[in-house]
Image (spheres, rainbow, N blue to C red):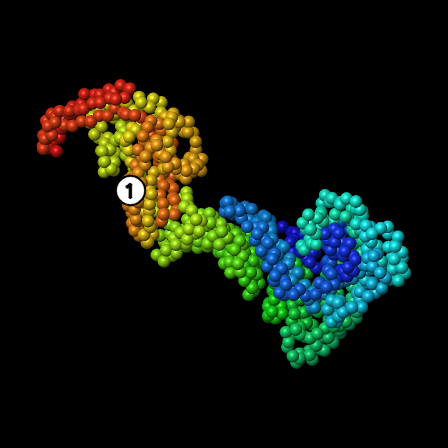
Amino acid sequence: MATMDPLMTPLGQMLLEEITPVVMLISTPSVEEASRKNGLSFLQMLTPFCSFDNIDVPVRTASDQPYRLHKFKLRLFYASDVRRPDLKEAKEQLKQVISEAGEKEFPDSNSDLPEINLELSSSSEYENTPSWFRFLNKELVRVASFSDHEAFDHPVICLLAVSSKDEQPINRFVDFFNTNKLPSLLNDGSMDPKISKHYLLVHDNQDGPADRANKILTEMRSTFGSGDCSLLCINSSLEAPFKHQDNPWASYITNSSSSPTQDVGCFLNMDDIDEIKVLMQDLSSKHIIPNMEQTIRILNQQVSATRKGFRNQIKNLWWRKGKEDGADSLNGPVYNFNSIESQIRVLGDYAFMLRDYELALSNYRLISTDYKIDKAWKRYAGVQEMMGLTYFILDQSRKEAEYCMENAFNTYLKLGSLGQLNATRCGLWWIEMLKARDQYKEAATVYFRICGEDILHSAVMLEQASYCYLLSKPSMLRKYGFHLVLSGEQYKKCDQIKHAIRTYRCALSVFKGTTWNYINDHVHFHIGQWYASLGMYDVAVKHMTEILCCSHQSKTTQELFLGDFLHIVEKTGRTFEVTKLQLPVINISTLRVIYEDHRTFGSPSAANIREALWHSLEEEMLPSFSAAKTNWLELQSKLILKKHSQNVCVAGEAVKVTIEFKNPLQISIPISSVTLVCKYSASTDEVISNENESSMEKDNKVDHFRNMSSDNSSFMVSEVDFLLGGGETTMIQLSATPREEGTLEIIGVRWKLSGTIVGFYNFEMGQPKKNILKRRKTKHLPNEKFKFMVIKSIPKLQGSIHPLPGKAYAGDLRQLVLELRNPSEFPVKVPCLELRNPSQLV
């Protein structure tokens, strides 16, 4: 694998977004009211401007060697949201995300099955997997936020926002921290309550000039210090709503207070936006980053003085060994924010967020042993997790990185429900680490381990695991398809029908064209049922027809498939037409066309006699047969057809077709209204114009199958009903009788199954072109045997032998008495025939 910057991988990008400093926001109702004019909360208004991709801030942490930050991000939260997410609320939120993705990703009913492109699967993962996976995984990571055992979610600063409309603004700023509504992290001793503060005065320009705001700002600076106070003016677009070419809030708004017709940010002009950008960039570069630097230097000095060095390590180890007899609880001992253990963890997390990864790793190692000895298992798992991520970013020992992630993951799992959310987060990061190194097969295994007991969660993890098998090198297609099916089953259990259909359809792309009949039947059957449950009966029937010809299944299963199929068709409330109905099976190789022409057969039995026998008779009648390879009747047909090689039939005389129907099932099926499908044209020249039409184009034109006119004044077709027993085969003869001159084409056969489903079979598509060419040695279309020129009459030759002896001897001469009639306009040349039996007694 080519060397890649770990921070440029999906995991690196995720860490740069999710492990970043937190800003706690507290605002007054007046501030929120001014923001809502733009369809935004105040936090939403600020959020798009908290990511900095083009800054240049020097940083010096524990060493004297400075480095520069060019990218930085802040995470904004209201004070009320700086808490562990409620598990029930989190599950509902995740369910909503998955449901919305199901609606968005649901395939169009007319779309083809997704194709598997193995060349594409070797490229970027995100070109091959559903886009909503990344969003969902981020939500799963965020569900485990604000834990008391880690410090990177602890707010580094509090942004206090008061409106210039508020009475006694200075008192409002002071009162913000004199309340019990502050986050529990600040009240329960998990973090230092002496958090840095920045005081922001918000002025709505629609309320008038900023004179009062400037006076308040002056008073704020004299009270809280000039460096910690700012003024933000918004809503400068007073007359007409401002139109934003690129809406910076579009991707951040999830639960906006805007109306459907309102333009988000409509009263914020470019000056307002620039002012917000400056505010947030100054907050980062002039307050947050310097404060974090100072905290790191102070904590590093304390830790070095008390914990680093051989003497301090021996002292700490000796002291901790005396605590081993303590109770072994899941939570372990409680560590206050000012304990040395908590300070080391804060030092490591701050260093990680400011990208001094070496300093972060050294402190994580230092505290890991302490937590293990103290049996503080959740804290131990958290530090191991961060060590694994730091090893990855430093691109150091891969073995150590994976060991730490697995150790953290297993430790979280041992905690049961207390560690489940963190185990999921750790597992997702571990998976991304494996993917970055093209270890997709190993990543799939981790997906299984984070499935958990929640069915919906399990469904998503199984689906993501399936794509890991697809992206493996070489691709493991069977495992990909199998785990898609497992995922679909789980989606169905939690009523995510559209996701179930989507995963099963993707699985069909693997099983299509294989001999895995049972899994194919399973997938098509369930897709059909699920589409029917959504009221999409047309698509449901399409899938159910794929499993009707299931001779490999048991009789019970065959009854189930056919019964469900008929039930779905019944729900449509109409006679359903299926162009490729597989029940019964039509044996196209048995197809015989019988009609009164130059190659007529006297009976169906005569039609089944080998062609070589007729050739031998023709050779006796015409000595030149072998050279000309024709007979006198064929010559007359060529005169009639002139340039066209086409069959000829007579109006009023039936063209008969015999074809075999087979029931592949073990149960009886009623077949009714079996009839030929014909197309008639009054012009005898129309056939020629269609000779260049491809067979594939003709296959798509099925209107003549469905739109059979009840007024067939030009031709008449026979109709047959019969019952096919289990495994039974029967030969059926059908006929079409033209009534007037023109062109008649027999296209296929049409029938009804159980009186409600109409099936079609296209004769043309059942006749391979190669075989036709090989037998006829001509360049006619595959269906030429089904096209007829209908004329009023044709020269007809009837004959009989008089007298008809019971025996004939060699050398005997018998006279052939012929009755000749030529009603047509074409001349007929009749040769003089003499029959002699040259052989022995016949």
Quadrant where the C terminus sits is top left
**Residue 623 image position (x, y, % from top left):** 21, 24
Rendered residue at 38%/42% (across/down): 760
Of residues 760 and 276, the one drawn nearer to the viewer in this rendering: 760
Rendered residue at 28%/31% (across/down): 653
Q: Is residue 122 above or below residue 813?
A: below
Q: Is residue 316 above or below residue 1?
A: below
**Residue 787 image position (x, y, % from top left):** 35, 31
Rendered residue at 27%/25% (across/down): 794
**Residue 8 image position (x, y, % from top left):** 67, 52
Residue picked out by circle 1: 732
Of residues 240 and 100, the one drawn nearer to the viewer in this rendering: 240
Query: Going by the image, does 535 lie left or right of 561?
Result: right
Label 1 secondary element: strand
Q: Is residue 78 above or below residue 689?
A: below
Question: In the rendered image, which quarter is residue 464 located in?
Answer: bottom right
Res. 26 visible in picture? yes
Res. 292 visible in picture? no
**Three-letter code for the amino acid on which mark 1 is drawn:** Ile
Q: Could you tell me how many numbered marks the image carries?
A: 1
**Residue 537 image position (x, y, % from top left):** 47, 49
Question: In the rendered image, which quarter is residue 421 located in?
Answer: bottom right
Q: Is residue 745 above or below residue 321?
A: above
Rendered residue at 30%/25% (across/down): 792
Q: For label 1, count other residues whose C-alpha is less than 10 Å away and answer few (under 14), some (14-19) or many (20+).
A: some
